[in-house]
Image (cartoon, grey):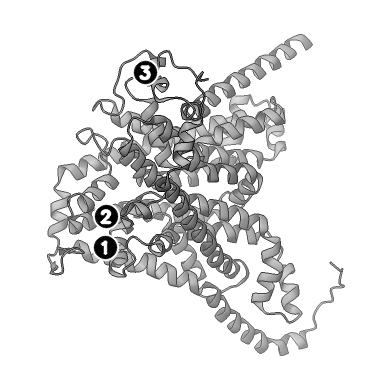
Amino acid sequence: MSLRTVTPPDPETLLQGAPHRKRRQLRRAGESYGFLAPTLILLFVLMIVPIVMVIGYSFQDNVILKKSSEFTGTANYVTVLTDPAFWKATGNTVFFSTVSVAVHLVLGLTFAMLLNSPLISVTSRAVFRALYVLPWLFTAAVIAVLWRMLLSPNGIVNFLLNTDVEWLADPQLALGTVTFINIWAGYPFFMVSLLAGLQGIPQDLHEAASIDGASQVQRFWNVTIPQLRPIIISLLLLDLIWTSQQFALIWLTTGGGPIDVTEMLSTYTYKLAFANYDFSLAATAAVLILLMSLVLAVLYVRHQKARD
Amino acid sequence: MAMTTQRRTLLAKSGVLAGLILGAVFAAGPVLWMLSSSFKSNTEIFELPPRLLTNSFSFDAYAAILTNSETLRFFFNSYLVAGAVTILTLLVAIHAAYAFSRFEFRGKRVLNVVIISVQAVPPITLLIPYFGLVVGLGLYNTYPGLILTYMVFTLPYAIIMMTGYMNTLPRELDEAVRVDGAGSLTALWRVLVPISVPGIVSVGIYTFMIAWNEYLFALTLTRTTEMRTVPIGIQLLMGQHSYEWNQIMAMSILGSIPVLILFLVLQRFFITGLTAGAVKS
């Protein structure tokens, strides 16, 4: 790149240039929509239309499979909202999501801090990081079959713990077990992001705190955590959004059973549609889930905009 | 005094190492067991006491998966769908990111909010109208049906990550070309895209991973065995050969290899790209 001498523009050319610039701006506005056109079309077809459709379905009967659908007002909402199974699924989803997300944070932060320790060599850091990231690289179907093997009555977990338990089939244990599997599968996302965050904290902040006599624990709470705060909030919200929508892991381990102890909002809705073929009720449940997610979405968007 | 400091460092170091090893067992133990089981015979998998290293090591389970036309078809489908989704998503996202990164236009903030919020729309909410749409358009049990629907999940991330990446590149680069008389499209493809390769690679990997791993829509929008993808294939294998754990594990490993390789080879690209978009402080 060549260095150019920058001369200040004289006012006259600036004035003359004004209408030109305006036209250029207009042309550029048109151009930007050209670049966005495929995105806008896809978002319209894949987001706006389906959301309008699903809301429409929720106020009708006999949708999708039968031609003779009719408007039924809020009847579907009454049916779903008075179904104890819906509330049971809501409770399970809340437990599964909040416990998973809380432990993801603790585990992700612990591993990130260990990996960031100056006491270990660069090579061992790389090796451990590669091992820690492993669960992230497997799809839910693989995670599900793997843990079904590990947790089977004559499997290795029961051998190591010297127990004889049906982890996924016992109504007392199943919800805790699927939550544990989800914890195993999900912490690397926190770990990778927090490790990047830790490496971005200026070293002199820690040094200044040390000089002021802060202990390691004090430095953690007064330097590390405040510096990571924006990342932590983003990760918590994003993980809460994803975990509350988890379907594959539940479907492939317990299918919502035994009885309904691991039934989530996603499996409940799926069964309404593809086991009972009641697409109207399924659409209603789907709209209710969308409304619940809206709360998280608003918090997330607000936080992301505040960070920019 | 010097002695205590040294001893304390040593103590801290062994503490950190012990923690790291404990974590590694938790993270990698199950994966190691999956790998080991794929080389065992089915009777040996549940033999007590369990052995990590088998004494009847064999590739039989892998051979069974790789010579079966049904399972090979799952791989073909997954590569085709994930590959097509990645290429299409990148094409659309590069243009959108260019607009977001370099242009000011009316509605930019609103559109930005829409794209961020798409991530919070539950897949199960979209599933029911998609099923209606895909059946209505005659795309049920077809590749285009899957490819098109996957883009709603891949596109928002791709645009956000790609915009984050382009924002880190100096504006002078592409503006210089434009001042010289070239159009915006030329500036994008001749200047920005070539220097964005690391960003494009990481966005591509992430997109491929999402598409390769997708389960719910693959389950619902396809019907015949010939149209199933790897995640559904693993489930089908589990149903048909519920006692052949070695084959199920071999299939799981083969089904994870594309993502593992992409990640291991391009780890550096991937993590920098991901954090450039996602982690901004």
For residue A171, above or below residue A247: above
Residue at position x 72%, y 90% in the image: A16
Q: What is the crowding at mark 1: few (fewer than 14 residues within 10 Å), some, or many (at least 20)?
A: many
Q: Earlier in the sequence, mark 3 or mark 2?
A: 3
Amino acid type, residue under disc 2 in the picture: Ala
Amino acid type, residue under disc 1 in the picture: Val
Q: What is the crowding at mark 3: few (fewer than 14 residues within 10 Å), some, or many (at least 20)?
A: some
Q: Could you tell me how many numbered marks the image carries?
A: 3
For residue B75, above or below residue B194: above
Q: Are marks 3 and 1 on the same chain?
A: yes
Q: Are marks 3 and 2 on the same chain?
A: yes
Amino acid type, residue under disc 3 in the picture: Asn
State yes or no: discs 3 and 2 in contact (Cβ < 8 Å): no
Q: Position of residue B44 (x, y in %)?
A: 42, 20
Q: Between B240 and A261, which is closer to the camera in this rendering?
A: B240
- Residue corresponding to mark 2: A286
Q: What is the crowding at mark 2: few (fewer than 14 residues within 10 Å), some, or many (at least 20)?
A: many
User: Label 1's element?
Assistant: helix
- Residue corresponding to mark 1: A54
- Residue corresponding to mark 3: A158
User: Label 3's element?
Assistant: helix
Q: Is residue A104 visible?
A: no
Which is more foreground, mark 3 or mark 2? 3
Report the chain holding disc 1. Answer: A
Residue at position x 50%, y 31% in the image: A107
Residue A159 picture quarter: top left
Residue at position x 27%, y 45% in the image: A267
